Image (cartoon, helix red, strand yellow):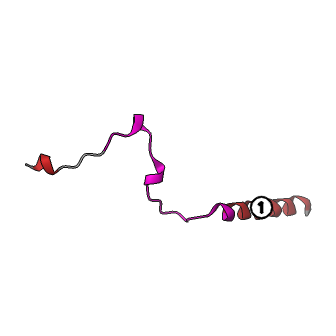
Amino acid sequence: MAKKDKKTLPPSGAGLVRYFEEETKGPKLSPEQVVVMTVILAIFCLALRFSA
């Protein structure tokens, strides 16, 4: 009787993980935020490179 209540998941395609279904605990960043942080980091690195 317990076997009838058991839910089975569909098989995943060849062992591939579907990341869009997993909940992450990290910060949620928009693409714009990533671009802005990258530009700020690049400017900071250039400032350090040419400050000496």
Whether residue 37 is in magenta: the answer is no
Residue 33 falls left or right of residue 25: right
Residue furthest to the left:
1
Name which residue lies at 52% across and 63% down: 26
Residue 3 falls left or right of residue 8: left
Q: Is the magenta stretch mostly helix, strand or loop?
A: loop
Q: How many marks?
A: 1
- Which residue corresponds to mark 1? 39
Residue 36 falls left or right of residue 25: right
Q: Is residue 12 above or below residue 25?
A: above
Q: Nearer the viewer, residue 15 or 44?
A: 15
Residue 13, percent across and down?
41, 37
Residue 36 falls left or right of residue 24: right
Residue furthest to the top:
14
Residue 9, percent across and down?
29, 46
| SS state under label 1 | helix
Q: In the rendered view of the protein, which quadrant contains the C terminus?
A: bottom right
Name which residue lies at 25% across and 46% down: 8
Q: Nearer the viewer, residue 36 or 46?
A: 36
Other residues around mark 1 within 10 Å, as few (<14) / some (14–19) / many (≥20): few
Residue 50, percent across and down?
91, 60
Name which residue lies at 79% across and 59% down: 42
Name which residue lies at 38% across and 40% down: 12
Q: What stretch is highlighted in magenta?
A: 10-33
- The amino acid pointed to by label 1 is Val
Q: Which quarter of the figure has residue 30? A: bottom right
Q: Which quarter of the figure has residue 44? A: bottom right
Q: In this view, does 51 lie above or below 21?
A: below
